[in-house]
Image: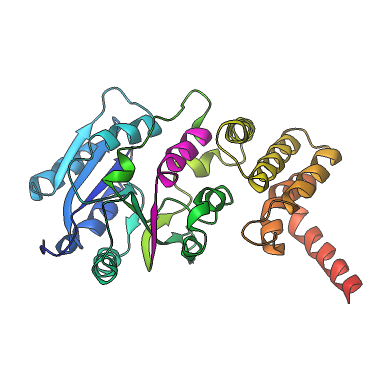
Amino acid sequence: MTDTYKSINVLVICYKQQEVIKRALDSVLCQKEYGLNKIIVCDDCSPDNTWDVLLNYKSRYPDYFEIHRNDPNLGIYQNMLKLLSLRGDSDLYVNLSGDDAFDTGYFKALQEFIIENNIDFSKPVGIFSDFANSAPDGEFSVRSQKLVECCKDNLLSLYLRQKICCRSLVLNNKVLEKHKGTIFNKGLALAEWLFDINRICMIESVYYVPVIGDIYFSGIGISTKLLNSQYYISESIEKWEYLKDKIILKQEDKKLADAEIYKARFLAHPKISLLVRSIFLYMQSGYPQKVSFKELNGFTFLMRKKIFGKYESRVWYKCLKSIKRRLI
């Protein structure tokens, strides 16, 4: 490790990922010359051969690996909190899920950016980078997090609108030592968001590196399996109500929360009044600009699916053509 590079600890959670954990670990090891200090892994009592894979990596790379196994299983977010407490000493920390991977040029670009910008780490620092989505059909798309540059004081507003996320987010210990406990008795959806919000709200100095960090392989994680289920819908209502009452301060964000609550209620019990109210509030919740058509299209997708079923795309396309003709 070069002395001029900041040391990096990579924090990895995993559960039942024997088929993909190697991809995650190899994506870190191939960048070890760019400041890698430790790879700290917390396996949540996997019933498959994940632990055996970790033992193999520990034996091959003893200087880089610290591995821990929970017994019994703690659950995903309790596991994340445990891993946070085991993070060790390092200049910087970055999380990686066992079914994700880092892009090969990530650490090099990160270290070069830190040196070029002479970043002051005496304050709580967060360094965002882009992240990618790799779909099961082979489609590869990149999500930019450049918005953090112009909205440094409103990271929460960006996060609530899913315009940024905590993938590819590097933090120093000044942020993590302020991390509060999260709430688990109100569902996974809220636990996940509070875990992220606790971190981004502690950041004082925000930076953006235009490079792909985390690669998310969609279609295989727990959130994908829960999405759109009745369980997920009920959790969504509880999540947004909690955020509105305890976390959110800006009026635009409160309107977004209300829009999401009405949307979830509509998905559970379709009524035209809930649909109209949800869209009305959402149109008033734009940040940092007014709500775009693309954003409205994404927000209403599940509701349209609920109304039109498998014919959703065909009906929506006809509606758009009709609207376009009237505007012309």
Q: Could one spot residue 231 in this view of the protein?
A: no
Taking depth in this image into account, of 75 and 154 the one nearest to the observer is 154
**Which span of residues is magenta-colored?**
189-208
Q: Where is residue 119 in the image (x, y as percent from the top left)?
A: 28, 62
The N terminus lies in which quarter of the figure?
Answer: bottom left
**Structure colour scheme:** rainbow
Residue 237 horizontal side relative to residue 310, left or right: left
Q: Position of residue 58 (x, y in %)?
A: 12, 44
Q: Could one spot residue 236 in this view of the protein?
A: yes
Name the image quarter holding residue 59.
Answer: top left
Q: Measuring 48% from the left and 60% from the top, which residue is drawn there?
A: 148
Q: Is residue 125 above or below residue 77?
A: below
The C terminus lies in which quarter of the figure?
Answer: bottom right
Examine the structure image and report whether residue 199 is included in the region drawn in magenta.
yes
Q: Measuring 32% from the left and 48% from the top, which residue is drawn there?
A: 95
Q: Where is residue 230 in the image (x, y as percent from the top left)?
A: 64, 32
Q: Main secondary structure of the magenta part?
A: helix
Q: Is residue 316 above or below residue 190?
A: below
